[in-house]
Amino acid sequence: MERIRISSAQFENRSGDKAYNLSVMERLAGKAAAEGSQVIAFHECSITGYTFARRLSKGEMLDLAEFVPGGESINALTRIAARNNIVVLAGLFEKDKRDRIYKTYVCADGRGLIARYRKLHPFINPYLSPGMNIVSLTCLDGNAGSLSVMITTL
């Protein structure tokens, strides 16, 4: 069985500043790929920030949240993955067409979204919905084995 090299990265993100956070993620993904990693996993809500959201209104949360797939951040993660030939895992706030908001963790490669996980017990903001209809937990499946994602609270 082929070995998978996975990097994990946590950085001081800027609350609500997706462009900045994605730029840091691109730099770190490039470094991880240069060091031989096939996968890089970022912390939950790495794209959007997290704790500042406890005081946001539903309208502010909807402005921050994105559709998954189809949102700008998923497109940015796809570009980052393609440029660096690496699978990227990251977190953000997701919205759906019914204005429900989720705390979501995604997996993307150079072709696009592979998987997403909606946290079952979100608690930082009262407008977050619990995840139920999980699209897929399997993020990477191949000769090297399988990788699945989940957000946990300890």
Image (cartoon, rainbow, N blue to C red):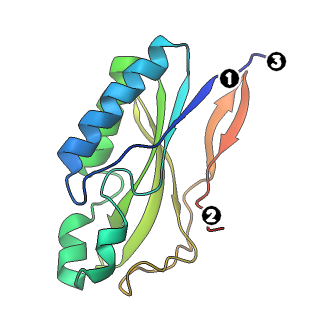
Q: How far apart are the alpha carbons under marks 2 and 1?
A: 23 Å
The residue depicted at 44 percent of the width and 80 percent of the height is 129
SS of the residue at dot 2? loop
Q: Name the residue under label 1.
A: 4
For the N terminus, which image quadrant?
top right
- Residue 133 location, x and y as percent? 55, 70
As drawn, the label of residue 71 is none
Q: Is residue 26 left or right of residue 130?
A: left
Position of residue 57 relative to residue 82, above or below, is below
User: Residue pushed farthest bottom?
Assistant: 126
Q: In this view, does 26 lie to the left or right of 128?
A: left
- Residue 114 location, x and y as percent? 49, 42
Position of residue 26 relative to residue 67, above or below, is above
Q: Which amino acid does label 2 sit on?
A: Thr
Q: Mark 3 points at which residue?
A: 1
Q: Mark 2 points at which residue?
A: 152
- Residue 77 location, x and y as percent? 34, 37
